[in-house]
Amino acid sequence: MTKKITVLVMAFILFISLLSIENHNVFASVKDSPTSDYRMHPNKDRISLYRKPKGKKIYTINKIIYEPGNPISIPQAVYVKKFYKNGWARISYKEQYTKKKSPSKTYKGYVKISNLTYNVHDFVSVFVYNTKGGTLKKTPNKKSKNFATVPLGTLVDIDHANNDGVLYGDNNNFPEFLWVRVEYYKNGKKYIGWLSYKDARS
């Protein structure tokens, strides 16, 4: 009987240990919200790529292209390497379906942040557009308490819980939303709060 109890106790201790390890791994797997190295898209029919901010133009990136023999348009993507507070972003872009016989070339340079968007079809995430960072608030009100600052370029997911994660409005600056509730991760901690359209873009 004593041996059976000992075995049960050891099994229970082993179970608790495995559970703790699993929980630790889950926590450790939570990554900070990205501030670079993610895909974005041109928000105009054509945007210019420069060798350096306000420097020489080196390429024109189209918003969409058509694959040869395919009538369906394909949104073009660029990969943002870094956002700068002067309103520019360093990006990498690989041209596709060129008429040239040579292999597609990868271009690296700078584009204006105002020429970029994240969402193409679905409104799922926003990125912080304000060069001073986005202010995360408890409620969708400019007088609400600030509890976190999200750095420029940070990509955050919209919290669509109960379908009330977005407050829409009609304004001249950005008509898609007035406030959006987002999930922001920093140092393994999750923050849920509201961002103003003045701070973020889709």
Image (tube, rainbow, N blue to C red):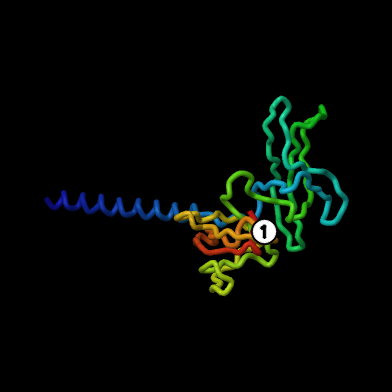
Quadrant in the picture for residue 134: bottom right
The mark tally for this picture is 1
Instruction: In the rendered view, tell whether residue 60 sits above or below residue 112.
Output: above
* In the image: residue 124, left or right of residue 91: left
For label 1, the residue is 174
Specify few, some or many for label 1: CA neighbours under 10 Å numbering under 14, 14-19, or 20 or more: some
Q: Image point 78% across, 43% down: which residue?
A: 61
Seen at 49% across and 54% down, the residue is 160
Task: Answer left or right for 194 relative to 115.
Answer: left
> Mark 1 falls on what kind of element?
loop
Of all residues, the one furthest to the front in this rendering is 170
x then y, percent, for residue 138: 51, 69
Q: Residue at x 85, y 56 (%)?
A: 54
User: What residue is at 39 percent from the left and 51 percent from the top?
Assistant: 22
Position of 143 with respect to 133 (left or right) is left
The spot of residue 66 in percent (x, y) is 72, 32
Percent across and percent down for residue 89 are 74, 55
Looking at this rendering, what residue extends furthest in the left direction? Answer: 1
Left or right: where 24 falls relative to 142: left
